[in-house]
Amino acid sequence: MGRAAELRGDAVRGRYGASPWHLLLLLCSFALTAYAGVRLLSGDWFGIALWIVGAALLHDLVLLPLYALADRAVSAVLPAPAVWINHIRVPAFVSGLLLLVWFPLILGEQTRRYERSTGLSADIFPRRWLLITAVLFAVSALWLALRRWRARPGRAPEVSP
């Protein structure tokens, strides 16, 4: 019985390209996604579909060219190895993503609505976003400094026990 099951698994792997478990998990994820989609679209399906298409178009036609332009500008200003540039890309990406998600509160456009809904002050959002951005860049700079210090020539290699 075990050998036959192995042969069936090999047959699935030969035709599908991965193990039967992978196929099962993939089918389960499709079923869960279909269920979530049906539940999500049961209300205002046109508004949700319009929002998703609009977000995709905004990203692909506006934001992606801006990302590429900013990346080229940083690469032109700082002619450094790509590993170093990544220490600018990652914190800038996370900071930009936070700005994208929280921009109405960071820019002060929805403060009254936020304060009415939560009873909390919305004045903290710009300062906290700037603080998080500064911490992200500082941690990235420290990480780069540590990497450069560990890779410097003449440093004795570490001996593992």
Image (tube, grey):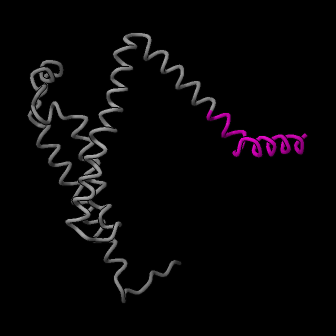
User: Looking at the image, which is closer to me, 52 or 115?
Assistant: 52
Query: Is 127 left or right of 23, judged from the image as shown?
Result: left
Q: Left or right? Give the position of 57 relative to 69.
A: right
**Where on the picture, by quarter, is residue 109?**
top left
Q: Which residue is found at the position 22% from the left and 59% from the top?
A: 73
Q: Residue furthest bottom?
A: 154
Quadrant hosting residue 129? top left
The dominant secondary structure in magenta is helix
Q: Quadrant of residue 107?
A: top left
Residue at x-position 43% and y-position 17%:
40
Relative image position of residue 45 (x, y in whole percent): 40, 13
Q: Could you tell whether 110 is left or right of 12 in the image?
A: left
Span shown in magenta: 1-26
Residue furthest to the top in view is 43
- Residue 119 placement (x, y as % from top left): 13, 22
Query: Residue at horizontal 25%, vertical 46%?
Result: 66
Relative to residue 137, is residue 129 depicted above or below?
A: above
Q: Please check the rendered image and state whether residue 5 is part of the magenta-colored stretch, yes or no.
A: yes
Query: Residue 121 placed where, x, y %?
Result: 10, 29
Split into 4 quadrants, where in the image is the N terminus? top right
Q: Is residue 48 part of the magenta span, yes or no?
A: no
Give the number of marks. 0
Residue in front for this viewpoint, 128 or 23: 23
Residue 156 image position (x, y, % from top left): 41, 87
Q: Nearer the viewer, residue 91 or 49?
A: 49
